[in-house]
Amino acid sequence: MKIAIMGAGLSGLACALTLEKYGYQADIFERRAMVGDRFVVAEAMFSMFHTPYDDAVKYLSENHHIHLKPTTNIQKVNIYSENEHSFIDGHLGFTNMRGKHPESYEKQLAHQLKGTIHFNQDVSYKDISKEYTHVVLATGDALDTQKLQPFDVAFKASFKGAVVEGEFNQTEVHTFFNNDFAPKGMAYILPHSDREASLVLVYPQYPENESLDKDELWKMCFEECSRRLDQDFKILNEYSIKDYRIGKIETPRIGNTFFVGNCFGAITPVIGFGQFESMLTGIYAAHDIVGIGEYDKLVQPLSEGYHDSLTLRRNLEKLDNKKLDLLTKSMSNELMESFITSKKINAMKILSKILHPYPRKA
């Protein structure tokens, strides 16, 4: 077998590491100049979205020999709406760094790799597929998938974010739901350290949002987040993204081509993160290539999780600020908190089935 991996992100590197575990080498082609060649941002892996794996870092280490060092564990998630504030506490997951940060997850994976990554390689799938028996498409771009098969886009998202300086408890995350500045979206603060954090505003680019001024929304968001945390944040650097596609493929594997990571659709729509899911797709593709699993079957729970998450998002999008206040207030109920944080039940699946009992597509 001659294996090519297009892309050195989380899914591509997880695939390469798993192949090495079973004695196989892959040629990894990365169009950028380095691993994690993008802006620095913090992300989160919330345990409540990974049932039955209550500790994704432990699971990856013990079951797949992929060893990650998170920035910190999450012990408290603060939830803010227009007029309410509540929180959930417990062991809720981890925060981690992405991009050019020296401890980003992609850089950690690259350091564990024995093989070589070929950088500045803007190779085409057409050319690669002629030379290699197996191709893993891990470019992180849904548009690359759409060249080969349908990619069902649920929505496009617009991001505005910054690294801010302030005072933070590294184990606390802050989330904001307010349609005035995050229409059908959210904002969040994830600490990097006790002095720096990522502040991110994200909302879907539905037709009714297209005419909105992103800079004005960002200004409102920044002011509200500063007010709720009673701090005068200092912006260290900023970034902006438009047309970020959230969706899912039709077929996980075509012939000997495997679609992994964002090319698969490994993003949880309700919150917008997907590191764990991305790495699992890479691992599962490797398992199929070495003959110890069937990719289509292995990723089925990920597909179901995507649709469960999308159902929750669609219902959250229906809530105005008054209803968001009621939902936020309900989080203070001990039974609600226990239901959401339980390690024994999949709260996301149960809620999605109640809200939409029939199978759905994006």
Image: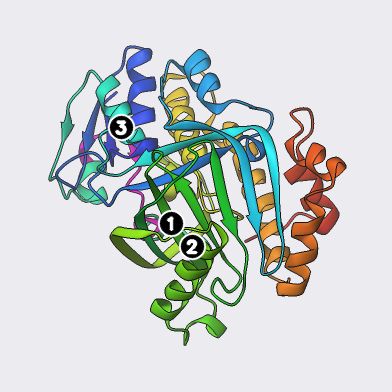
Magenta stretch contains residue 161: no
Disc 3: which residue: 103
Q: Nearer the viewer, mark 3 or mark 2?
A: 2
Q: Nearer the viewer, residue 143 or 339?
A: 339
Q: Dot 2: what SS?
A: helix
> Residue 342: x and y, percent?
77, 32
Q: Is residue 304 above or below residue 58?
A: below
Magenta stretch?
130-144
**Label number found at residue 199:** 1
Magenta stretch contains residue 142: yes
What residue lies at 38% left-to-right and 13% top-to-bottom? 22
> Residue 103: x and y, percent?
30, 32
Residue type at tag 2: Ser
Q: Dot 1: what SS?
A: strand
Q: Is residue 147 visible?
A: no
Image quadrant in which you'd find residue 185: bottom right
Residue type at tag 3: Glu
Q: Dot 3: what SS?
A: loop
Q: Nearer the viewer, mark 3 or mark 1?
A: 1
Q: Check disc 1: other Cα within 10 Å, few if <14, some if 14-19, many if 20+.
A: many
Disc 2: which residue: 226
Estimate the spatial distance between the alpha carbons at disc 3 and disc 1, rounded to whole Å.
Answer: 19 Å
Q: Is residue 316 above or below residue 110?
A: below
Residue type at tag 1: Leu
What residue lies at 78% left-to-right and 42% top-to-bottom? 337
**Label number found at residue 232:** none
Q: Is residue 91 visible?
A: yes
Q: Are marks 1 and 2 in contact (CB under 8 Å)?
A: no
